[in-house]
Structures are given as structure tokens and as C-alpha cells.
Image (cartoon, helix red, strand yellow):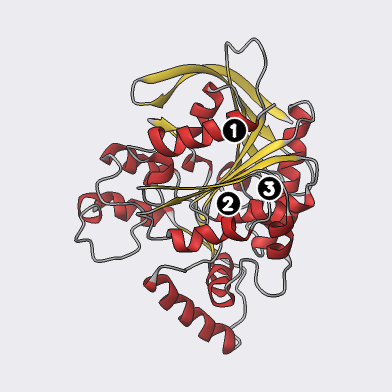
Amino acid sequence: MILYARTLPQTIDRHDRATFVKELVVTGGPVPLAMVRKRLADNQGGTRAPVLLVHGFGQNRYAWHLPARSLANHLAREGYDVFNLDLRGHGRSRHFGARPPRSVDDYVVEDIPIAVEEVLSHSGQRPVFLVGHSLGGLVNYAAAPGLEGAVSGLVSIGSPYHFAAGSLSLRTIALFVEALRRAGVPATGMSFPVYPIGAVMRTFQRVADSPLFPMPLRGWHAGSVEPHILEQHLRLAFDRAGIDELRHMFEWATDKRFGGPSRDYVERFEALDVPLLVIAGTNDDLAPPASVRPAFERSRAKDKTYRTEPLGHIDLLVGRDAPGLTWSAVARWLDERAP
């Protein structure tokens, strides 16, 4: 269902602007999910293919679209029908009543299939390219095998298939979480806002951007994101985080498989034969290449590609060099496979 539509000029990057058709799309049913749809306004020949963008843990749709730098707008300008999703409990979906998930399984079993069905209904039933950042990429890995015929390809950006691999700090936290699991500490079903964390980091942005910043899990590579872009990301893209989501990810680190030992997500994804692009950031302290690359290595897809870029976790999407590296790599890959 389209709630409203308007045509407006927006920034792609720096002084690069274009005019887009923007629509607010909301799914029906018991879980109302919100998506912002973008198309180039003067594209008379129609769009090349639909693309569904899925944000990562604790984020929302603004991870893909900042007022001053927007991968969503870039893909729309390249001719794609772009749907920027807020998962349940995040952004506009939360405002429309979609409560936080009980576990990541809610995203996999309900949110992505619901969103894909909605995208198909607006894009002439054309198969969808699923593009995910961080946890969003893992959610797409798990959901795609159940959407046979509806998915044209998968793109993951900074998605840790073996969470915590290559990071001593994350592995240490994983050991603590495993101790809680062995002690029988129950799930909480609670979520907490992360935008106050973003507010604190904005206040001390210059300190946090220093190479001497003592916290090893900054989320971006020092000096790789301009201050005004980083301020926008910390203010707009930081949303809410589920405690159980976070706990599950650290449990996956211990199990060395996403989804945990009781799920067949790994087996189904690895057997899936759809085009796959996996991108890792060599300066990513939250999803180092050692945690990202196994998805490429273990996938049995005939058409699969692995790339690394000298970027951090956030900079892969909105860093100073993201348009010339991540964005162009994704657009070229899509161009070669879009109908």
C-alpha cells in the first residue's frame, strides 16, 4: 500500500543531485513494515530491476540514505526501483506498530518474505535483488532460500558469516555471553535505544575519530568519514537494538555458524544457487574479512564474487570513498545481472 508519493530533488553525494519519485510503502497484515521507494523521476523507459535494501543491527533505513550521501539515491539514479526497508521495531515500521522482534528469526521468517511480496506487487512481479548491510546481509542469506524464484541475487556488505572471527574484542565478549547461556540466563525480549549512544559519540566525535580512541569497536575507520556525514549517520541511522538479537549474534560466534545449531540457515544458504556478491572492509572492526569471507567460500552458487575495500563498517556505506568503491562495485555487479 502506498501512503503517499511526491517528486523531489535530493543529493546523491556532495554536489551530485537528481530528481526522484519518492513513495512511502507500508505492508498490510499483522506486521506493518514501512519502506521508502525511490525511482528516478525522468526515467521514461521504466526501471531495470527492483532492489530491496535491508539495514543492520541497531540501525534503520537511514543507514542507506543520509541527506548528504545516499547509496539508495545512487542506485535509483542508476535506473533501479529501490525499496529501503525498516525492519520491525525500527524506524517507521515501529511508528506504524511493528513491535521489536522476539529473535532474528522474525526477520527471516516474516519480515523479508512480507517485504519481498510487497516489492513484487509494485514492480510487476519481477524478481528482487536483496542487498544487506551487516546483520541485514545475514538475514537475507537465511531468508532467500525460502523465496525461490523471487530473488535475482544477493549482495552482502560487511556481513559477518562467522561472527567475531578476526576480532579479539568480539571473541572475548562472545565468551562472556556463552557463560550466560550455560548459566541458564533467560531471554529478555527487551530492546534498548542506541540513538543516545549516537548522541554521546556525536558530542565526542573528534575524540572518537582519533586513531588513539581506546575503544577497539568504533564502527568506522579513523578519518574515513567526513565529520558532517558521520554526524548525520549517528543522529539518523542509530535506532534501537534488541538485547536478544545481540545475544544471539554472540552465541553464533561460539557456534561458528549464524542462526545457531538448531537452525538450517547455513545449509540452505550454502546450497542456494543465485548470484552472490560479498563485500568486506579491510578496516572493519565489527565484521573483519575473516568473518565475512566464509560466506563466499562456502556458498555453492555458480556465480559468486568476493571483494574487499579499504573501509570500515559504517564507511562501506557512507564513507568518503564509498561512492567510488562500494557503490560502484554494487552498481556494476547489478548492471551485469539485471534484466
Q: Nearer the viewer, mark 1 or mark 3?
A: 3
Distance between mark 2 and mark 1 Cα atoms: 18 Å
Q: On the rendered image, what quadrant is the N terminus found in?
A: top right
Residue 90: image x %, image y %? 57, 49
Work out whether residue 201 can be spotted.
Answer: yes
Residue hosting label 1: 334
Q: Secondary structure at mark 2?
A: helix
Distance between mark 3 and mark 2 Cα atoms: 23 Å
Out of 185 and 337, give the one closest to the viewer: 337
Residue hosting label 2: 136
Q: At 76% from the left edge and 30% from the top edge, which residue is drawn?
A: 126
Q: Nearer the viewer, mark 2 or mark 1?
A: 1
* Residue at far front of view: 302
- Between disc 2 and disc 1, whose residue precedes? 2
Residue hosting label 3: 302
The part of the image, by quadrant, that contains residue 269 is bottom right
Residue 23: image x %, image y %? 62, 26
Disc 1 packing (10 Å; few <14; some 14–19; many ≥20):
many
Out of 11 and 256, give the one closest to the viewer: 256
Out of 289 and 19, give the one closest to the viewer: 289
Q: Secondary structure at mark 1?
A: helix
Disc 3 packing (10 Å; few <14; some 14–19; many ≥20):
few
- Label 2 sits on what residue type? Gly
* Residue at far bottom of view: 183
- Between disc 3 and disc 2, whose residue precedes? 2
